[in-house]
Image (cartoon, coloured by chain):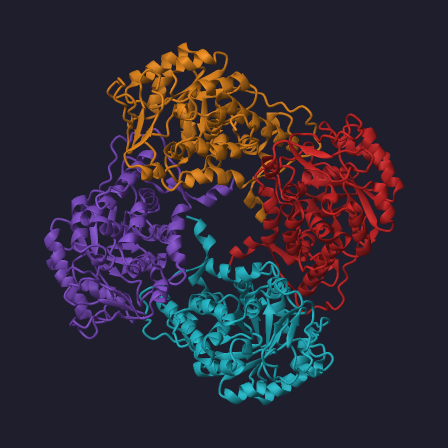
Chain colours: A red, B cyan, C purple, D orange
Amino acid sequence: MMNDTLTCVAEYEDVFKSRLEAIEWLYYVSGSDEEITLRQNREALKRLRIKPRLLRDVSRCDLTTSLLGQPVDFPIGIAPTAFHAVAHPDAEVATAKAAEKMRTCMILSTHANKSMEEVNEHAKTGLKWLNVYLFRNRTVTLDMVRRAENSQYKGLVFTIDNPTLGNLTRVYKDKESVLFATKVTDKHGYGHCAKYVKGYDMVPTEEDVLPADFNKRDQSATWEYVDWLRSQTNLPIIVKGVLTAEDATLAVNHGANAVIVSNHGGRALDSVPASIEALPEIARAIGNKVEVYFDGGIRNGIDVFKALALGARAVFVGRPILYGLAHSGEEGAKNILEILKTELHRTMAFTGCSSLSDIKPSLVVHESHYAKL
Amino acid sequence: MMNDTLTCVAEYEDVFKSRLEAIEWLYYVSGSDEEITLRQNREALKRLRIKPRLLRDVSRCDLTTSLLGQPVDFPIGIAPTAFHAVAHPDAEVATAKAAEKMRTCMILSTHANKSMEEVNEHAKTGLKWLNVYLFRNRTVTLDMVRRAENSQYKGLVFTIDNPTLGNLTRVYKDKESVLFATKVTDKHGYGHCAKYVKGYDMVPTEEDVLPADFNKRDQSATWEYVDWLRSQTNLPIIVKGVLTAEDATLAVNHGANAVIVSNHGGRALDSVPASIEALPEIARAIGNKVEVYFDGGIRNGIDVFKALALGARAVFVGRPILYGLAHSGEEGAKNILEILKTELHRTMAFTGCSSLSDIKPSLVVHESHYAKL
Amino acid sequence: MMNDTLTCVAEYEDVFKSRLEAIEWLYYVSGSDEEITLRQNREALKRLRIKPRLLRDVSRCDLTTSLLGQPVDFPIGIAPTAFHAVAHPDAEVATAKAAEKMRTCMILSTHANKSMEEVNEHAKTGLKWLNVYLFRNRTVTLDMVRRAENSQYKGLVFTIDNPTLGNLTRVYKDKESVLFATKVTDKHGYGHCAKYVKGYDMVPTEEDVLPADFNKRDQSATWEYVDWLRSQTNLPIIVKGVLTAEDATLAVNHGANAVIVSNHGGRALDSVPASIEALPEIARAIGNKVEVYFDGGIRNGIDVFKALALGARAVFVGRPILYGLAHSGEEGAKNILEILKTELHRTMAFTGCSSLSDIKPSLVVHESHYAKL
Amino acid sequence: MMNDTLTCVAEYEDVFKSRLEAIEWLYYVSGSDEEITLRQNREALKRLRIKPRLLRDVSRCDLTTSLLGQPVDFPIGIAPTAFHAVAHPDAEVATAKAAEKMRTCMILSTHANKSMEEVNEHAKTGLKWLNVYLFRNRTVTLDMVRRAENSQYKGLVFTIDNPTLGNLTRVYKDKESVLFATKVTDKHGYGHCAKYVKGYDMVPTEEDVLPADFNKRDQSATWEYVDWLRSQTNLPIIVKGVLTAEDATLAVNHGANAVIVSNHGGRALDSVPASIEALPEIARAIGNKVEVYFDGGIRNGIDVFKALALGARAVFVGRPILYGLAHSGEEGAKNILEILKTELHRTMAFTGCSSLSDIKPSLVVHESHYAKL
């Protein structure tokens, strides 16, 4: 079955459950608390209707675009998710090679099983961004930034929606103490995150040698942290986790080059809006100043189209990539991207859009639009 | 059981599943992608409420009307669907005879198992329209038009919502490659569509001799294609697949004699509006200029009434006819039409409408109308 | 179990199924077509919220009122339903005695298993109205009116929402021809309605001697029929089946003394509004001119309260009475009324209403009221 | 399993069912009538979305506040619920000790298995309020007030939404007569409430010596009762059970020091609004004059946050405390409070709120807010 070609993300999702141990599977598919936001990420996308325009020349649909000046073949990148070794032994190296071959962008997680240098070594020409958290010890942050600069990473994705860990209730109910163990020690150099435990912080495995405060988030961080980061590097800064127009505007004012509208896959605070619900107000507030990206609930190319119509320049997908990895490593991750690209292409053909700029807000309406006869 | 008289479409639908092979059944009942539009075609109809008017003389309800000048006994025709031989060996001949006997209109599919000439031979007095796609090779289109003219077809239904094939996920998941095989080779003369495969185009069976580009859709087509078709024939052109007021207006401006509001039975692009949701804006935009028809989700005469109230001059039904065919051929298809006609009649009696012109927009409201106390 | 005291209508409903034969049970619980209206009768009531007022003296709640000048102990009467002999051998006599003992109003159905004279004989002091249909043969109508006048019936309930029979799909699917047989021949004198068959009209049993056109509805009837009836009798005329402000106004203009907002228990045309949805516009239109009553979906006293708040002077209940009859005849029907009365009393106590006139529209809001924070 | 640490209220709820006898469990989890309000208490909370603000210093979140001048560590107190002995032999003493240790407020029920003096004896430093009903015999009321004054109770919670008993249908269906028996005789001195029976009043056990009219509610009570209570004591009066702005304003005008927005846990009148639905209009009407509290449906700290954002100064939780008690007595009740506190803390960290005053109305919107694109 390893070489089966599956036809949609939902099929990979079904397979995913059978490839992982229960606790691993649960870790990836869960959302926080009652999982309202996790579900709404999908449901809110489904509530949108596409108004197709017909008889426009769609014989050549151009899906290419650029992310902060870097060309990509289509506007679907890979969101940062933790511990790809759980899904496949090649871990983030497989993921990066898939992105490179598909000519799109990969965001490498802070919590990776392969070091950023090793990832770069195997996917030199691929567009890569590094995900960085609000580390309490700014030496850690700075060290990661310098290494990213030295390893051809073209952007820093600064995740700001996680001052504390999300409350993954379903995971914590399954086992009360040790929840998750990566199969391969992290190789960013800090050996962090070998185990997940209930509560606020992560605990290293005994074999790891860690700075005492590594991986502690800085709960006192304010936008000054972004100012500081801005002053330390020329790499573009992409602020991730914004859900309001107000914070999006602040991000721009503090030097962000782009913003990712995201609720952390429903894993940070439950009850926050679905990403697609938050997108329009953010696109209106800052869309003419910086690039706006999107993640949260994308499972097919129709979803991608909706996010683009509501103001996203590109979307990023998280869990589906893990589904692909678990199925067949690099090949599986590549196929997920291929499927989403094909589906977006098809959606464009069906709606008369021959380029991404044709995907205008007027093509998408909320289902309640049709309550007026 | 073959001669049982069933009392509603839903009963025929239940029987349908038992008469076909699983993959055949799946092919007909599926919608594209997540089947949101397929479901909404039904659900949106159910969300409408009828405000009945009482104590009007309904002893004689007149259901007759005309379609582009041709008289029909009631405003319910047969939508084009592919490969009727799957449902019954008499295929489209049975369907056409049922329509003829009920004195209504049948639209013959491009993907028929009986040639348009053979269909005409068996149902000479019936009102028949031919469905034509946007063939890349206009010689194919023109040949079909000429043959339609020569075989008493009174209209060309030009389906424009299918620049590419819909993504019938449930079908493709069932079998990954060959999905569907017609039981009888198509007889329009081109032997097309013998097999359905995953992806954009259809593949002929080996025994077929096909023009190299037959059945390729012209993805570069614009409204110029309609202009061209208009210039080639005096047959009325009915543009099918419109879901927005803008495209409806363009259709009229490019010479369409009528428009069918349709989302291809939820099989083209998923997430587009339910047909009944799209109808009102289209009826308002062009209803005073050309005839507006409707398909999508009709399963009983109450649904028909709702579509007529919101601006349709007539509706067309697709899958229910296949249910009838599979049950008992011509007789079954005829009974489906009879049931729908009776149900429409009953709905008119219950609402004080003695003619179709009495079925006014004010008789139908959206359920949200009643949220105001 | 026959003497068990059950505590709410829902419990009686559960028992009901076990007391009847399947086809009988189905006949009573079904609605027409897809049963949208049947379900909405309940759901729309549940969507209403009551805003309780506190600390008002509710030590003495007065539930008494009058119906067209006749006093009743509480504003809950018995709606006309067919063939009570199916539920209990004492049939409508048991029902009438229950109403008499509870000092409320019973509407006797046209399709009764006991003649109006026999019913009157057993419940002389009870307030009784007779339900009359739009008979094609006005001699039949007139004969019923005269007999009603002679037997102490105080009102004629003129049901106008049934120019044809409702399409009880679930019943017709179960058995295609003979659907229902009463256990006791009707005694109004015409022996009508002994069997129900699919289609427009009812068929007499062979033993019955029927006028040729008895029980045929007059599908040509207009408001002139009401004028005629008005001219033939001094009994109050209560027009039943109205769902729009327009028809309610016409009813008043044509001499109706009261109107019952009703959709025939979801058994006439499916897809019409829930009764409670239609009530407010009707109460606004004619509530200051004639009495407005309500039936449709009442299953507890909270429902009654909601209907009264939205403008009904009284409500009538149909199926719940049959549940009570089937359980224990007169005693069961009486207990149903007792339960509903107690529940209405309790609701009044909880909302600060010591008389029915305290049940004002401001005490009830639609759930969507609370979408505004 | 008694010493397991559970991680959320839902886990305790699951355990609760296994610790009690069926009829006991049913008594606590049921709501009145169709349980619409019981369900909506939860559902309406889930329909609210939180708009998080990021990059604010949340390293020190201050959850402390005061209730009528008395300091508490966090804004979550214990609502009055009946008969804690059913959940644990230590009954209200365990509950009071849990509240004292967590430094929050406990409201002792009128229907307690431990006398208010005994409760005070074991939790002298804890903030305690006494719940009082509208007793018909004001001597009873006054006696309870005096004893409360003498036992360090700092407030009188005056429940006004219960002029009659709620109709706990599920309970009454289970057993028709004797429904519930406390395991330990009540010790407030009146021995009341030893058994619950169907209907309006409670019946004492034979061993109890009761004033004849003890525990009878005064259904004739008006706001004059509050005036009288106000004149009899200097203790703060907290009026509980208000669901409208009108009654909230009356409460203030009649001397209430605070109001608890509550629908009695869905156990008084069914169909009234969810507590969270009623909160905003009440907070707007009186929030600048007196303290507004909230109960109804709180199951996690995110719910608490929503209630605070919409105007509550603090919330009270009922059933969850019983879940904790049934699990492990004082320790369990304490853990419930600990969990909710931690979850509120986490929610504040995720939304940029370092103090309770940061939890502003603008941080919470109704889900329908996002129907506008």
Nearest the eye: A168 or B155: A168
Q: Is residue A123 left or right of residue C178?
A: right
Position of residue D35 measured from the top left corner of the image (x, y, whole percent): 40, 40
Position of residue C91 measured from the top left corner of the image (x, y, whole percent): 18, 56
Residue at 40% in and 15% down: D116
Q: Is residue B216 above or below residue D40?
A: below
Q: Is residue A318 above or below residue C172?
A: above
Q: Is residue D118 above or below residue D275?
A: above
Find residue C167 and report its image quarter: bottom left
Whether residue D27 is visible: yes
Q: Is residue C309 left or right of residue A27?
A: left
Find residue A342 and report its image quarter: bottom right
Nearest the eye: B71 or D176: D176
Find residue C303 and report its image quarter: top left
Q: Is residue B294 left or right of residue C290?
A: right
Residue found at the far top of this picture: D150
Residue found at the far right of this picture: A150
Position of residue B86 measured from the top left corner of the image (x, y, whole percent): 55, 76
Position of residue D85 measured from the top left corner of the image (x, y, whole percent): 40, 23
Image quadrant holding the N terminus of chain C, namely: top left
Q: Is residue C219 left or right of residue D64?
A: left
Nearest the eye: D118 or A50: D118
All told, the count of numbered labels is 0
Whether residue D68 is visible: no
